Amino acid sequence: MTENQRQDGEREVAPATDRRPAEQGPGLRPSLLDPLFAPARTLPGIGPKMAPLIERLLGLPERPARIVDLLFHLPQGGVARQLRGSISEAPPGEPVTLGVTVVSHRPSGFGMGKRPHRVLVEDSTGDITLVFFGMPAARVEKMLPLGSHRYISGRIELWDGHRQMVHPSRIVDEAGLAALPAVEPIYGATEGLTSRAISKLAHAALERLPVLPEWQDPAWLAKNALPSFAEALGAEHRPEDAPPPRPEGAEGPPPQTPARRRLAYDELLASQLALALTRARNRRAPGRVNAGDGRLKAQIEAALPFALTGAQARAVEEIRDDLASDRRMLRLLQGDVGSGKTAVALLAMASAVEAGRQAALMAPTEILARQHYERLSAMAGPLRLRLLTGRDRAPERRATLGDLAEGGIDIVVGTHALFQESVAFRDLGLAVVDEQHRFGVHQRLALGAKGEAVDILVMTATPIPRTLALTFFGDMDVSVLDEKPAGRRPIATRLVSTERLDEVVAALGRAIAAGERVYWICPMVAESEFVDLAAAEDRYADLRQEFGEAVGLVHGRMAGPDKDAAMERFAAGETRILVATTVVEVGVDVPEATIMVIEHAERFGLAQLHQLRGRVGRGSRASSCLLLYRGPLGQVARARLEMMRETEDGFRIAEEDLRLRGEGEVLGTRQSGLAAFRLARLDSDGDLLEAARDDARMIVERDPALRSERGRALRVLLYLFERDAAIRLLGAG
């Protein structure tokens, strides 16, 4: 079994005599944490029926749900079980517990479809109807006998002017009320698994929590009045006080208690310490000079059909300074859509070639790799470029690998095929990684390991808020392209209801008759029985009826060659309307495309809408973006679409997206597998992130090998939050 498998919970248990403490075997998780990484299905109460539900809620395709996952699945709120007033005083929309007398039953009856069973209850101030869907009458009557006194918990709603409570969360008698906890935590659940069942499992998981060393600075904990890690978990899963009521439909994180802030800080410190250790190791690793005399750079820059912006020129100088030093470069180049990252990357790679070395550019998809290759080829002048992808024919691939190993290629452009074992460079000096968050850090390191002291430049077209840059790219220096090249025209953005779809189609007919080209983005490939969204294939069929052969289709389920062919037909103007899923989101460049239609725009995040809109406005003609939405819009969806109409500033949009949706969605990490935080919220814990970053720097300066008493405790923290790759770096020197 591999070390990675062992870290994922299916860990081999060595005999007790063979146990090594973590500081002696840096790749081995300390046995102290074994109870937390055991599968959740080993907890009492999880039988064959419940196990799949727990896996659906907390497991991942590559590993089962574990006890630590249950502990980190914190409640979203709590319901106080003390009696709260009377029926007439109970506020609608808030959880309440009331004492009532059962007055009458009105069963659904026969032949009445899905009408619910209704029960009228009252107290001295008024009455309320309890509503039960799909529950047998006998069961309801047993829970609520006529004339009995019961205590009910739930939310009161107003329906047609009358108070009602649908499926009360609790119905108990006097003895049952006395046995209830003061506060019942409310968890995010899944179909078939109730919040109450999750609470019982979380309590069982708490019993497995071992005594852990304190990894936080005691003075810092005292100053901020924060509890221990175990006390914080206990306070969250066994709350003694309910949080203040929140308005119905309220957005944002749960209220910040001392317990929640302690847990958030633990997670942030683990993240920042791992980044600080990685950065320190990169700083220690010997580098080498990877920049020449500047002649190739000057030659290529002089031949460009445009002048560099001030931001591009600044970024090129920052990169050349790194390349010219004897320290390893690890730099993030972030720029908004159309800010000119490709030209900066080319000039950086030319600098490495001047020094007699080779460069590689890795893109996340074949479409983007081919596009980078074509764009770079047009600007590269005397540089020898080659494309390497997983679809190359065997003879082509052999020839490319041979030339690469012998030095007959200056720059190779490709996909993840570049870091396969069979790929060998004569002397790789610079690796450029496009859209870093779509790759794992290990893939980036694998490409860097293809040469001696390879400098690494990471590019992203996703504008990243400062907190996210610190969190996910804190081991890197950062260059920002915050200017757009001259001549770029603003994109007119309009919100259009789907009720006006016929008008939109008619307008497209006039546009393509005038020579325009159009993207039409749909969020799904095929109809889902659960989510009512327009499917790309269905929209393609509809538009083909209207415009015939002028309509093309591209989506992620198509084979690579079919996808490329569809894009090439659109780029060549053979098709005028390209119906697509978000496969065209990043990097695809067709300057002749001037209209972007995004169907069900309310379903997309701000950063993704901004990326999609950036596919047009890349030529000299005026461009427009139509955001088709289905009303009525919720508050958050409306805020997103209004922001899109208001600005094209990607950095402002990214900050707003972080506020509205959280870090995992802004970076697209929900899809790419990069773990978002489970306990911390970057939109509300920014102050803790800054403190964690400062603390991590101080720790690495004072105890770079984590050998002190606190250092050993911090190793446990890194393993607990699965940042243990940093510990393996300690062992690697």
Image (cartoon, grey):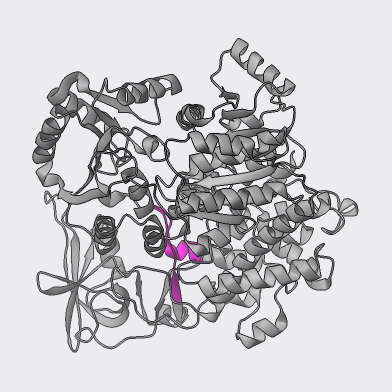
Residue 424 painted magenta: no
Quadrant in which residue 620 is drawn = top left
The residue that appears at 78% across and 58% down in the rendered structure is: 30
* Residue 264 falls left or right of residue 140: right
* Residue 652 falls left or right of residue 687: left
User: Is 605 situated above or below 184?
Assistant: above
Residue sitting nearer the eye, 201 or 60: 60
Pinpoint residue 163: horizontal percent, then vertical percent: 17, 75
* Residue 14 falls left or right of residue 176: right
Q: Is residue 233 visible?
A: no
Pinpoint residue 625: horizontal percent, then vertical percent: 24, 45
Residue sitting nearer the eye, 650 or 618: 618
Quadrant in which residue 36 is drawn = bottom right
Quadrant where the image shows the N terminus? top right
The tally of labels here is 0
Quadrant in which residue 292 is drawn = top right
- Which residues are drawn in magenta? 184-199
Q: Is residue 442 visible?
A: yes
